Image: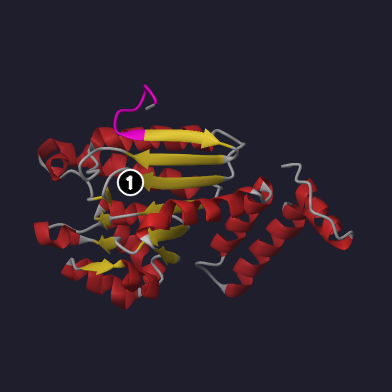
Amino acid sequence: MSPQYENIRMEKSEGVARITIDKPPLNVLDIKSLAEINSALEDIKADPGIKVVVFAAAGRAFSAGVDVKDHLGDKVVEMITTFNRMFRLMASLEQPTLAVVGGAALGGGCEIAMFCDMVIASEKASFGQPEIRVGVYPPLACVSLPRVIGRKKALELILTGDTIDAQEALRLGLVNHVVPTDSLEEEANKLVQKLATLSGPVLKLTKRACFQGLDGDFEEVLSKVEDIYFNELMKTEDANEGLQAFVEKRPPVWREK
């Protein structure tokens, strides 16, 4: 375990950064844990060699959420500020993000998974926002969950606090793939490596282009996507290499610029 972290592990290898929550037994996130994740995200953000960011967890739960004790009294402002900073940092990442969920992802754990660009889950995974049952609501889920699965189902899950299984999460579009529990890591690694073999700059620009279309007027958004394509993407060496390699019927050799 990296000496600067007590509740997470952060590893970087061959363009992939992996943050693993490791706070047994259920990976409940207190202020210190969230601060460690934020530190790891700042490290990743400053590293131009990272192509893909993976969120995973040790033990039987992805995360049972944030520590309720840190919501009480004068701690609540620091908790929410630190928690929301995590998502502000995630939103600022140019790289694709993937959550690997092998167990319960509840409350803040569910929010981390939903906020990632992609989610691969084991058949034993579950998802839910139970905050309403303790008299509060999940701010991040209120903003993001309707965008991911639609307003009506998001309201149902947030207002009831119900938990759904992996197959229902797949049906709703909250996760991309559900796989057998014993092959979760293998299948996640396949997806990660598929992304890691691509050009980092092109991945980043493509992600930004996709996010342009989430909100706003169609013509305005399309113009922004065109601008990224013409004035940034097509000025990269990798875009031209990829197209030329296709014409020449050979594998592309990415220059990462």
Rendered residue at 38%/62% (across/down): 180
Image point (40%, 32%), residue name:
39
Q: Residue at x 38, y 36 (%)?
A: 38
Left or right of residue 24, residue 52 in this image? right
Nearest to the observer: residue 244 or residue 68: 244
Q: Is residue 236 visible?
A: no
Quarter of the figure with the C terminus: top right
Above-or-below relation of 171 to 101: below
Residue linked to disc 1: 84
Q: Residue at x 49, y 51 (%)?
A: 97
Q: Nearer the viewer, residue 240 or 225?
A: 240
- Residue 95 spot, x, y in % from top left: 55, 48
Magenta: main secondary structure: loop
Residue 3 within the magenta-colored segment of the rendering = yes
Q: Position of residue 45 (x, y in %)?
A: 52, 37
Quadrant location of the N terminus? Answer: top left
From the viewer's perspective, tell me whether residue 21 is left or right of residue 212.
left
Left or right, 53 with respect to 161, comes to right
Q: Relative to 47, is 130 on the left or the right? A: left
Residue 71 in sight: yes
Check the image and name the residue furthest to the top. Answer: 3
**Badge count:** 1
Magenta residues span 2-8
